[in-house]
């Protein structure tokens, strides 16, 4: 099975290339990452998805885009009060907007890439000059009863996962530290801690099994 993954930026692109692709290769899934270079307009996302879907109908197309700060004009956005339900609505609405492309399935990271990094706080050790105090505070955030999973860590301008990390670790660089931390955590651990991410991985593998039959 061949899979195009439309990525929000360079970190997500490298995440797919260096972590997700080797992981999926074990299931005979061959991935090709596409760097969107930001998501300022839905029209930009739509154009690239349509080109990928119609340009190679024998391959599947998915996305690794942050739910947080997804363009407001994205079909289906804000049609549910819960981010997880909203993400599913966006999936269906974007597919409808693109004429029901059968080889397309949207995936949004809830709420953003840095949320996945809260899957294992020990992976922050040695990154961005993180002190023991910093690690304890990151652990406190992860274990806050308000956040049943890392994907529940909220998405406001002040309290998004990336903002929380930067407040504690001003030297944090997404393209450097973010990827290094994710590698330490592993795809398996992220999937174990993050149900929406896990569902995406399961869908990819299920499609591969269907293709193999």
Image (tube, rainbow, N blue to C red):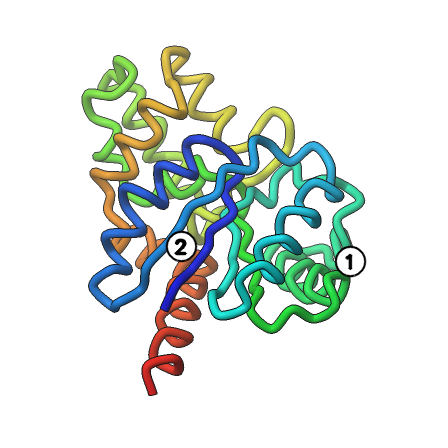
Q: Residue furthest front?
A: 55
The answer to whether the residue labelled 1 contacts the one labelled 2, judged by CB atoms less than 8 Å apart, is no
x, y percent for residue 164: 47, 26
Q: Which residue carries the number 1 mark?
A: 79
x, y percent for residue 106: 57, 59
Query: Label 2: how many residues lie within 10 Å, few (<14), some (14-19) or many (20+)?
Result: many
Name which residue lies at 73% across and 37% down: 41
Local SS, label 2:
loop
Q: Which residue carries the number 2 mark?
A: 194
* Residue 197 figure quarter: bottom left
Local SS, label 1:
loop
Q: Residue furthest bottom?
A: 213
Q: Is residue 5 left or right of residue 51?
A: left
Most foreground residue, 187 or 195: 187
Most foreground residue, 50 or 138: 50
Most foreground residue, 168 or 42: 42
Most foreground residue, 171 or 5: 5
Query: Label 1: how many residues lie within 10 Å, few (<14), some (14-19) or many (20+)?
Result: few
Note whether 100 is above or below 76 in the view shown.
below
x, y percent for residue 114: 43, 35
* Residue 211 figure quarter: bottom left
Name which residue lies at 48% across and 43% down: 34
For residue 32, say whether it is visible: yes
């Amino acid at each position: 099975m061949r899979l195009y993954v439309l990525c929000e930026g360079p970190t997500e692109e490298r995440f797919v290339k260096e972590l997700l692709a080797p992981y999926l290769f074990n299931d005979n899934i061959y991935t090709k990452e596409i760097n969107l270079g930001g998501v300022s307009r839905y029209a930009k996302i739509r154009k690239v998805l349509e080109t990928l879907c119609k340009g190679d109908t024998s391959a599947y197309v998915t996305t690794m885009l942050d739910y947080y700060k997804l363009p407001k004009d994205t079909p289906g956005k804000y049609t549910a009060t819960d981010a997880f339900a909203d993400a599913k609505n966006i999936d269906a609405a974007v597919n409808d907007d693109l004429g029901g492309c059968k080889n397309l399935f949207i995936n949004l990271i809830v709420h953003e890439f840095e949320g996945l990094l809260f899957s294992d706080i020990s992976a922050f050790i040695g990154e961005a000059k993180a002190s023991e105090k910093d690690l304890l505070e990151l652990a406190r955030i992860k274990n806050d009863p308000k956040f049943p999973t890392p994907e529940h860590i909220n998405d406001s301008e002040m309290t998004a996962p990336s903002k929380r990390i930067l407040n504690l670790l001003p030297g944090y660089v997404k393209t450097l530290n973010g990827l290094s931390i994710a590698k330490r955590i592993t795809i398996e651990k992220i999937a174990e801690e993050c149900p929406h991410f896990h569902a995406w991985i399961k869908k990819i593998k299920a499609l591969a099994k269907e293709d193999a039959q």
